[in-house]
Amino acid sequence: MKERNILFRTEDEMDFMPIIPLNESDNDETQDLDIPEELPILPLRNTVLFPGVVLPITVGRDKSIKAVLEAYKGNKLIGVVAQKDSNIEEPAMDDLEDIGTVAKIIKQIKMPDGGTTVIIQGKRRFKMGVLTSDDPYFKAKIHLLEEEEAPKDQDFEAYVANIKELATQIIQLSPNIPSEASIILKNIENPAFLIHFVSSNLNTGLGDKQHILEINHIKSRADVLMQLLQKELQFAELKNKVTNKTRTELDKQQREYFLQQQLKSIKEELGGDTNEREIKEMQKKAEQKKWPKSAKELFQKDIEKLERMHPSTPDYSVVYNHCDLLLDLPWDEYTEDSYDLKKAKKVLDADHYSMDKIKERILEYLAVLKLKGDMKSPILCFVGPPGIGKTSLGRSIANAIGRKYVRLSLGGLHDESEIRGHRKTYIGAMPGRILQSLRKVKSGNPVMILDEIDKVGADQRGDPSSALLEVLDPEQNNTFYDNYLELEYDLSKVLFIATANNIANIQPALRDRLEIIDLSGYAIEEKVEIAKRHLVPKQKEAHGLKNISFKINDNVLEKVVEEYTRESGVRELDRQLAAIMRNLAKEYATNEKVKSVITEAAIEDILGKPRYSNEIYKTVGMPGVAVGLAWTYVGGDILFIETSLSDGKGELRLTGNLGNVMKESASTALTYLQANTKKLALDKEIFQKKNIHIHVPEGAVPKDGPSAGVTMLTALYSAITGKKVKPYLAMTGEITLRGQVLPVGGIKEKVLAAKRAGLKEIILCWQNEKDVQEIESSFIKGLKFNYVKTMQQVLDLAIV
């Protein structure tokens, strides 16, 4: 016969589906049954047969079919055992359980597909003995197991009643089991048959059923069965709960309106829903709020909209957030200014050394405020190189006048909406950063730092610097309009302080609205003082050396400033001092002591050899080389101008990454010399037979501006005449074709750079004398200034 799988019912199909016994009271008949010592063996997959239970089985394997046919021809008795592993197609004797059930074949049915279905009834339990044959089917010796009589005590009766109760509950919770099954259960009177019947139909593992079959003691069998029923009941309850929940979710949309109506009625009984409470809380806050009439009316309109809206609608959150912003903004909430000018000056002096011009301007503002009681805040703009304390000065001003402080970084800002806000109809719309900052500090008159205003960008999303025009105009900012707020807001009480490194990058219209205060770099003496007062104590505390005593003298600090830093501010100085403190911290952690005085030699051990030297600037050394002074955004610097002559046709060559203005200065200087050969006693032939090459070192750095005009002319004159330029001399100024020397900017930075470089003499335009007078005299001690009007005076002073 053709090989095929045995088609047993799956676990799902056997979900406690009761099989009606033919006769539960056939125990006497079973005892009288003549069972031979040797029987054909029928292996079953996924099924355990219990005594008394009737089971339909489809037989498909050749050996099994032959065993069934042989038994059916004879006494119709067959030994039924379960397979240990149901996946094995052709089991050996080792793959079968030892304990099985003697079954009687009640009916044999031939199926249309060639298979055989038999209805069998379990009779007696047996233990399998020696295998007597394995072909054409299994045949083995069997030993019948005696069945224990059911005890008559109340304890066992309680077991039986409990089993019936649990099984009935499972039937009620299982939709696949017909309700008639519970009636059958109630009518079973034989306790042993009840245990076998329930065990057979229990939806549990094959191992658990086999375990019950193998137990000889009927009370123990009932106990194990009860435990399994408890598990099955818990699973059925959980399954029922999940099914009901899923059905509820499917019906949710159909019943939503009805439930919402019920919910509304319940919430009304409980005193209103959450959204209504939130709206009432907002209205309470609004009653205590001091705000203009226009804001109050807008808030009232929004509240009316909220009351009409359902909370699940998308616009609800938009209107709610708008109401929240209206409530959070400080409309007429201002901090009280401190008008104690002496105390304000003391605070400013304690936080920042020098910067007298800014301090004076703040004190003037406070004085007017004290006398008048109210005035529009000035729009200040601190312009200067990095690291000189522009941003930190803003915080110091806020502390001095007793106002809240907020900082707004504008560096790299591209979107105009960052200033004016987005229209609230957009998804994720927010107010602009100006209003967000005011909402955060909860004050209508803070000190607001607009940091890096010269680095605001512009692209297709708008121009933020144009949006700032309204913010920073004292005549307009009392009616600042934010797109999200949709209402005018008064910014006139806010003290705006902008910071910038390069004023040329600020849009002209915006620059016109700012009160520019120039902050130049620090002199060496100022840096030493700042290091003593602020940087050294800060770094000592930051490195755990606050309570450890050691001294750093002024000459040591001066060495660090001159030989290890080249900057207008003090950031690099701060980093070098941090390096010193780290070394001292390591020394203290290792040896538990540090030197009481830090010497110059110790500085070289810690920081290495000096990075910068002034010796290169002190002497020029050969004709054609002059020292100029330049201004950069990080402060003043020294600039060499080198000129060389070579045989040629009188061509002028310029190198060193020079800008157009600087190239024009070189051409102007050369033309002046050519036009004044007789006056300056120069040979005309040189300009026709010699090529002139002007080079400015540090070719990777772009250079531009007119201030190198005098230096270029001096270098050209020196190269042509072969005379050297005076050592220790630097110069700056613009020249004209008439030989006039014109004033230039950045004088303080340039003069301080010359002082740092160790130069002794400077040539300047006579109109720059006023700029020199503004520099603290102690900072330029030892420098000699020569003020000139013409190029002839420059050459007389510069050429040896």
Image: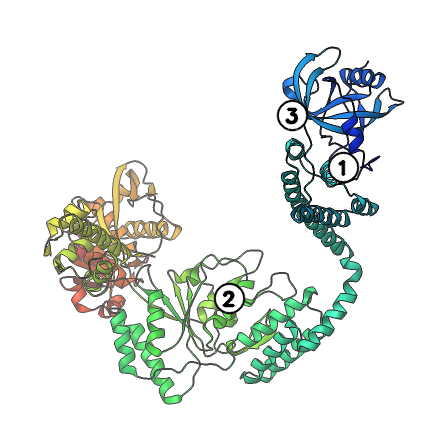
In primary-sequence order, the first of circles 2 and 3 is: 3
Q: Where is the N terminus found, in terms of image quarters?
A: top right
Which quadrant holds residue 778?
bottom left
| Residue 276 relative to residue 24: left or right | left
Q: Amino acid at mark 2?
A: Arg
In whole angstroms, how far apart are the C-alphas of marks 2 and 1?
A: 69 Å
State left or right for residue 30 relative to residue 218.
right
Give the secondary structure at mark 2. Answer: helix
Tell me the distance, in whole angstroms, between the alpha carbons under discs 3 and 1.
19 Å
Quickly name the residue at label 3: 84
Instruction: Answer yes or no: is residue 263 visible.
Output: yes
The residue where tag 1 is placed is: 14
Q: Does residue 585 sit above or below 191 in this rendering?
A: below
> Mark 2 sits on what residue?
433
> In the image, residue 757 lies at what x, y percent?
19, 54
Q: Residue at x 60, y 63 (%)?
A: 429
- Residue 507 in the image: state x and y as whole percent: 47, 63
Classify residue 187 as left or right of residue 231.
right
Res 725 seen here: no
Q: How many labels were placed on the picture?
A: 3
Badge 1 crowding class, 10 Å Cα cut-off, few under 14, some 14 to 19, many 20 or more, is some
- Mark 1 or mark 3, which is nearer the start of the sequence? 1
Identify the secondary structure beneath mark 1: loop
Q: Nearer the viewer, mark 2 or mark 1?
A: 1
